[in-house]
Structures are given as structure tokens and as C-alpha cells.
């Protein structure tokens, strides 16, 4: 049975900041680092594609601290350490707008506000989790959501 392939790129805006990152497929950790110091590509197989099933891809930012964000006297952010997630693909098909449409970013502004479930536009700036739910066979899910 053929496995669905996935990949995505992670790029830190501040390579010296100690931002950690995890990626999970369902309940299996597939990538874990305590420091994303350069742009990296995460890729690998997912569950078999021919089996009808629901799946969740989780992307987790960890280790963000208040000192990673510089704020001026007016309260405006002048520099920040974030992770940019790009080129998310399933079976070599870039999801593009589907990530924006379907992914949910849950975070609490690093403890400064109440927890929220927000849209995800490719940037993780707060400790939290981006979840993208999908089903296999992947081609049916793509047809239903494009």
C-alpha cells in the first residue's frame, strides 16, 4: 500500500533565538528540535493513502520567550523571532491556500492573553499548535477541499 508523502519548510526569522519545533502525524512525533537555527525541510511518509481514515498534522512552536520580541515605547513590535512555515505539500502537491483555509492555530499569546483558536497564515509567533486535519485517500480530500 502506498504511503502519502508530506514535506514543508521551516525558516526562523532570528536564527539565534532558541525556538523549538515539533511535528506530529496523528499521535506520532516525526520531528523534534529545541533550536531551529536555519531553514530546514521536514519530510517523510504518512499513513497509507489507500485506507480511508482521518488524520491530523500538528506543528508546534515551543520555547518562545518575551525577550524574543522587541517592542517600542508605543507598544509596536519592532523585531520578533518567529517560525515561517512554507511549501506544505501532500503527495508533492503544494497545499497553498488550503492551509490558510483549513489549518487552526491555537495559542495564548505566550501566556499574556486568554487561549484562542486562530487562522494560520504561515507564521508561528507564539508558543502553540497549528493543526491541519485531512483524510485519506488524499486525492479525494484534495478534490473536496480545492
Image (cartoon, helix red, strand yellow):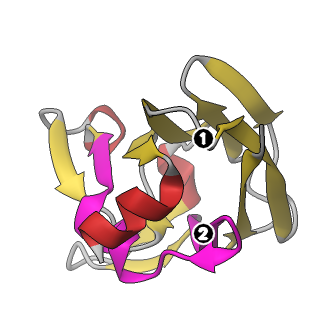
Residue 82, by quadrant, is bottom right
- The x and y percentages for residue 78 are 43, 82
- Mark seen at residue 66: none
Q: Is residue 118 shown left or right of residue 77? A: left
Name the quadrant of the N terminus: top right
Query: Range of the magenta residues?
Result: 82-106
Residue at image mark 1: 50
Residue occupying the point 47% across, 47% down = 66
- The x and y percentages for residue 25 are 61, 32
Residue 73, by quadrant, is bottom left
Decide which of 38, 25 is in the foreground and name it.
25
Residue occupying the point 41% across, 43% down = 135
**Considering only vertical position in the picture, is 11 above or below 125?**
below
Residue 10, by quadrant, is bottom right
Decide which of 94, 52 is in the foreground and name it.
52
- Label 1 or label 2, whichever lies nearer to me, is 1
Question: From where the camera sits, is residue 42 visible?
Answer: yes
- The x and y percentages for residue 134 are 40, 46
- The x and y percentages for residue 98 are 35, 72
| Distance CA(mark 1)–CA(mark 2) | 21 Å
Q: Is residue 10 magenta?
A: no
Residue at image mark 2: 88
Q: Tell me which label, 1 or 2, sits earlier in the chain.
A: 1
**Number of numbered tags placed on the structure image:** 2
Q: Is residue 76 shown left or right of residue 14? A: left
The residue carrying pointer 2 sits among few (fewer than 14), some (14 to 19) or many (20 or more) residues within 10 Å by Cα, namely many
Residue occupying the point 62% across, 44% down = 49
Label 2 secondary element: strand
Q: Is residue 85 magenta?
A: yes
Label 1 secondary element: loop
Q: Is residue 44 shown left or right of residue 107? A: right
Residue occupying the point 49% across, 63% down = 139
Amino acid at each position: 500500500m502506498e504511503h502519502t508523502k508530506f514535506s514543508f519548510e521551516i525558516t526562523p526569522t532570528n536564527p539565534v533565538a532558541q525556538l523549538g519545533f515539533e511535528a506530529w502525524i496523528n499521535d506520532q512525533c516525526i520531528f523534534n528540535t529545541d533550536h531551529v537555527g536555519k531553514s530546514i525541510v521536514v519530510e517523510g511518509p504518512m499513513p497509507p493513502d489507500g485506507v480511508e481514515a482521518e488524520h491530523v498534522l500538528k506543528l508546534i512552536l515551543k520555547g518562545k520567550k518575551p525577550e524574543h520580541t522587541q517592542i517600542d515605547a508605543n507598544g509596536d513590535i519592532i523585531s520578533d523571532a518567529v517560525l515561517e512555515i512554507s511549501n506544505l505539500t501532500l503527495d508533492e502537491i503544494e497545499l497553498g491556500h488550503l492551509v490558510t483555509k483549513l489549518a487552526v492555530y491555537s495559542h495564548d499569546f505566550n501566556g499574556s492573553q486568554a487561549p484562542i483558536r486562530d487562522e494560520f497564515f504561515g507564521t508561528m509567533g507564539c508558543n502553540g499548535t497549528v493543526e491541519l486535519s485531512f483524510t485519506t485517500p488524499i486525492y479525494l480530500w484534495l478534490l473536496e477541499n480545492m
